[in-house]
Image (cartoon, coloured by chain):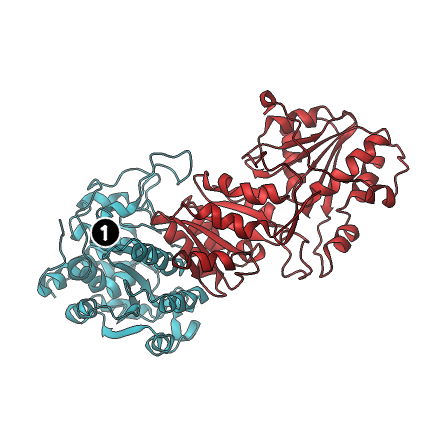
Amino acid sequence: MLTSSTMPTDEVRRSAQRIRKRVFEHVMRNGGGYLSQACSSAELFATLYGRVMRLGESEAPLHPPAFAGVPGRGNHDYVSGGVYNGPREPELDRFIFSPAHYALVLYAALIEFGRLDEGALEEFNRDGSTVEMIGAEHSPGVETTTGSLAQAISQAGGIALGRRLKGEPGRVWVLMSDGEFQEGQVWEAVQSLVHHRLDNLGVYADVNDQQCDGRMDDVMRVGSLGEKLRAFGARVYDVDGHDVEALARPAEEEPDGRPLFVLAHTDPTRGVPLLADRAPNLHYLRFASDDERERFQRACDAFDEEA
Amino acid sequence: MEIVNRPHVENFIRWAADKPRVVVLSADLTNSCEVGKWRDTYPERFFSLGMAEQNMMGFAAGLAREGFEPFVHTFAVFVYRRPYDQLAMSIAYPNLPVRLMAFLPGITTPGGVTHQAIEDVAIMRATPNMTVLETADATEVESVLDVAHAVDGPVYVRFLRGRVPRLFPKEEPMVLGRARLLHEGDDVTVLTAGITTEEAMRAVPALAAAGVQATHLHVSTHKPFDDPLVLDALRRAKHGVLTLENHTIVGGLGSAVAELMAEGAIATPLVRLGLRDTYAHGASQAHLMREYGLDAMALVRAVEQLTGRDTGLREDDLAQVRVEEVHSLAKAEAL
């Protein structure tokens, strides 16, 4: 059974705002965390789960199980975090999550779409839990281990190629961050996706111009991702990353032999304008003073999830 | 001794005929890794990934997740050096059945330092979930496919190409985790792997004729390294143990033997022959084996030093030793 790929736009928009709010509340409880990523990518996650991806119902418990060891010959209890995205069926899509430090946003999205319970975030970054801060492939919603950035797109390429060989109609969706495009591997992957005509793969990239050290333009300019990707032969859509309709539309186009890239141009302070005071240091929110913490707490309390 | 020309070419085509899930990935070294004819035979199962090994590792991982068995073919240095993070995180961590066919091990290439994989066994041994194999002759080149195929997880294979000797009978295929017992004696124990085995097969009979009796074990599984036959052979050596490897002496066969000896409290000297913590350079295999002390003569000299006996053996004596196919002397119960 398919779930959720036809959610009305207004509802997707509200889901995004609730994802943002849930992450904001968690970051305040936690005394810091990855907040700007939720600000920029909330609509991306909500649109992927609500409109784009054709997924079956989760096969995992609503409350995430404890860590059961790393994959290996001796470990028969190992369960992939991918089961939160439903069964692996030929006609269903697959979700490959690349920027593993966005894990908190992913978990909030899974809660929003009924794949995790509300209490799941209590396990976040707790010793012995699968709800890790930098998700690995046992973490809810995570199928591949991609904390070393830029590796997901290549793995997804192999999955897309394998699915095509098996004649499966389902597509492979990859969520990426723009900072990853500084890694050479991404461009190796793009050229191979184009060369092998893997149009069953689509990338949604959160283009928020932010990375760990600050603004990408200060750390290492990548120029226009759209122009570069087009030059490689990819099918590229530059869209407003907070516009649900604009995000969803490219996925509705008939595949045409080219891998699809949706560049979602986003604002890393969206919904939390107070964050802009910290620019360019947005990557991980650490409060410099009690005063700052209180200001953020007031913003969190006043956060309007209907906005 | 029979020399087989490019044994992998036809053997791999035959072997893959009834295995539709076997696919080949290549990074612009297709004929160099003897899979050009394989590509032409099974074009729908062959994927050119270009000179982009980091991405190739990810593609291999993705294909393995979809139920395929990717055989990555490229030079060893481009398997473990350039894309190590991808190999470790995309393939080894999830324990995926990717077969890494690593050509040009050690100093088997005149390609120089960039093409010579001299620390690969060390790095692959240190990589969790990885099985590490090495081929020494045509029989192992042919039979390593079955060995790798049966492993639930990634496998790294030091592979030989071109003109390859047949040291072991065809009917004695490589077996995972089992060494071949090629000679028995109580004075010293010699362990070799890959191309150094043929060297020891020249030296050991000559040493025996000169009165020094060696047990000679050929190792084709570097990891797991837990064959009881090896432990028995280490225990029987009166004067000591020697390892001879086409690899740096740090982290490879010599180190693996040292670990076993230390853990087994085997108190006898160990001499590790191989590249002595150095890079090599571009020259012929024979030249480099002599220059870096990886050949039969280097083994004889080391045995003389260890036993305190002058065998009187000279290069000419070793060159005249006829190397014949040798059955493993290991009895079934000892395996």
Q: What's the residue at 29%, 46% (across, down)?
A: A81
Q: Which chain is indicated by disc 1?
A: A
Residue at the farthest top position: B333
Drawn colour of chain B?
red
Residue B181 x %, y %: 67, 30
Secondary structure at badge 1 equals loop
Q: Nearer the viewer, residue A118 or A91?
A: A91
Residue tagged by mark 1?
A: A90
Query: Within 10 angstroms of label 1, few (less than 14), some, or many (20 or more) residues?
Result: some
Image colour assigned to chain A: cyan
Q: Residue sitting at 70 percent across and 24 percent down?
A: B235
Instruction: Name above or below for residue A141 compared with residue B170.
Output: below
Q: In the drawing, does residue A95 fall left or right of residue A18?
A: right
Regarding residue B243, the answer to whether it shows in the image is: yes
The percent coordinates of residue B10 (x first, y second) are: 53, 51
* Depth check, front residue: A278 or B268: B268
**Number of callouts in the render?**
1
Above/below status of B30 relative to B298: below
- Residue drawn at (78%, 43%) of the image: B296
Say which quarter of the image contains residue A53: bottom left
Say whether residue B125 is visible.
no
Q: Quadrant for the C terminus of chain A, please.
A: bottom left
Residue A206: percent from left, percent from top? 29, 67
